[in-house]
Amino acid sequence: MTTETLSPCPILIDNEWSEPQTAETASVFNPSTGEVIAHVPMCGADIVDAAVESCARAARDWAETPPIDRARVLFRYKMLLEEHFEEISRMITREHGKTITEARGDLRRGVEVVEYACGAPELLKGESLENIARGIDCVTYRQPVGICAGICPYNFPALVPMWMFPLALACGNTFILKPSEKVPLTGVRLIELLVQAGLPPGVLNVVHGGKECVDALLKHPKISAISFVGSSPVARYIFETGTHHNKRVQAAGGAKNFVFVLGDAEMDKAVPGMIDGAFGCAGQRCMAASTAVVVGDAQKKFLNPLAEAAQAIRVGATDRDPQALMGAVITREHRDRIVGIVEKGMQEGADLLVDGREVRVADAPDGFYLGPTIVDHVRDEMEICATETFGPVLNVMRFDNLHDALESANRQAFGNGACIFTTSGKAAREFAHNVKAGMVGINVGVPAPLAYFPFSGWDYSFFGDLHVQGHEGVQFYTRTKVVTSRWFQPGEGDIWHKD
Ligand code: NAD
């Protein structure tokens, strides 16, 4: 029996919200209950084209708007986000399934990007040098790239869109946002507030959909830049197709992050660090701890308390149970896929230290639940070692020494995050220097950079040059113009009329 009310899921063009009558819609679920809470329109090329034309009409005036005036819109937006903070956090919990604490973190990290983007006049300053030759000066300006599009994953319904549009707008671009079709409601609410903050019509438009919609964005000749965050196969496709169509592209992909625990680590810090890293957001984070790399003596000291802590996690319906520490995963199909990966690992010789497959939530029998699961004795050659599970599953790999452990981790294709728990500065330094990952934590379980640093994945975790956030984000959303100037005195340099 359905008890949830259906939420509208409109598109935005020229600051007008409407629900297009598309041939297809997709269901949006509350993962905690398994109920449908909205139908999202799957837009095609016609709607993308209308959004692009709207952006094109608004582009010149927005680009000419002084950076401080663009920042003022973002200041007002920041205030509105604070006012509606709880409401949006609850919306994230409802459509994603993460706990309210995690939802608040998702939104807070996004608000921090808005705060950073409010510094537009400072961020956009160029360089200058007098007398590059006698009487000749040189300055650089950062100009907007044009119409940008953002294509988002489901796992951070607020943060990932906010990695993109606040900075793109601060830099003077117009923007088309395509939230994930699995969690579109948060994206719509974020943009309702942006319009309320005074964003002029056409500066940001919202479309919804899947591959057809994305392809229309990737191939549209008037779009100059694409920001993408999602799984690696799609990230690679976005990068190849977007660059083929002459766009600059930043495409962040998936991950398989290794968290090392050495025998000298403070276990009372390493255990909660690993538990939060592996099971926070039910493991649906690109910076999740996917593999505990347990070295030497740590095998005796770390694994029993880890298993006990995992078993103590209360799994529940996060939209109604404030005691729940972990929620459901995004869809039933995703749950089944994760279980399939775990079972393949068992066939290949891994053991279950903690088995979450039978975890059920009594008051929400149709939710998409999977309890914390720890898979021990994982080895390099197993599929579960290299595959991103993106769920509450932690692999355990055992090694005698740091050197062998590092060699194994560095053989993996992904290169997002890597962490170490140790009290040895020497080991930490060796790890940070040699590990093949773009974001490293030392006694920090989830080393996700904040708004003022780039989110710096490597290898199969990122396609492109300039990452989201921080100065790299500013560089991505601007292009540099170098102006070289010389002003003559009357008669000076007049080579044709010299006596
Ligand atoms: P996904 O790749 O399935 O979808 C991401 C976006 O791409 C969605 O908007 C979707 O509509 C679109 N899409 C899906 N298939 C497509 C196709 N064939 N062609 C064109 N567009 C397509 O990812 P997801 O399941 O929504 O999100 C989870 C993934 O995102 C994980 O792999 C996770 O690691 C990754 N992620 C990475 C980062 C990072 O910073 N590296 C951050 C968050 C999430």
Image: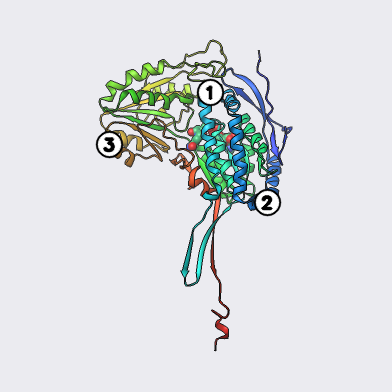
Q: Note whether ligand 1 is within 8 Å of mark 3.
A: no
Q: Quadrant of the N terminus?
A: top right
Q: Nearer the viewer, residue 488 or 295?
A: 488
Residue at the image position 38 percent from the left and 23 percent from the top? 272
Count of labels in the image: 3
User: Is 69 or 498 nearer to us in this picture?
Assistant: 69
Specify the quadrant that holds the C terminus. bottom right
Neighbour tally class for label 1: few under 14, some 14-19, many 20 plus, Cα within 10 Å: many
Q: Are marks 2 and 1 in contact (CB under 8 Å)?
A: no
Quarter assignment of residue 22: top right
Residue position marked by numbered label 1 in the rendering = 100
Tag 3's secondary structure? helix
**Mark 2 to mark 3: distance in Å?**
54 Å
The one nearer the camera, 313 or 392, is 313
Q: Amino acid at mark 1?
A: Ile
Q: Report x, y in % for residue 432.
A: 33, 39
**Left or right of 497 on screen, residue 266:** left
- In what element is the residue under mark 2? helix
Q: Residue at x 49, y 16 (%)?
A: 323
Relative vertical location of residue 177 with respect to residue 68 in this rendering, above or below: above
Name the disc covering residue 61, or none. 2
Identify the colour scheme used: rainbow
Q: As shown in the figure, which amino acid type bears the numbered disc 3?
A: Gly
Figure quadrant of residue 381: top left
User: Label 3 belongs to which residue?
Assistant: 425
- Mark 2 and mark 1 lie on one chain; the one further toward the N terminus is 2
Quadrant containing ligand 1 reads: top right
Mark 1, secondary structure of its residue: helix
Looking at the image, is mark 2 or mark 3 earlier in the sequence?
A: 2
* Structural distance between the alpha carbons of marks 3 and 1: 36 Å
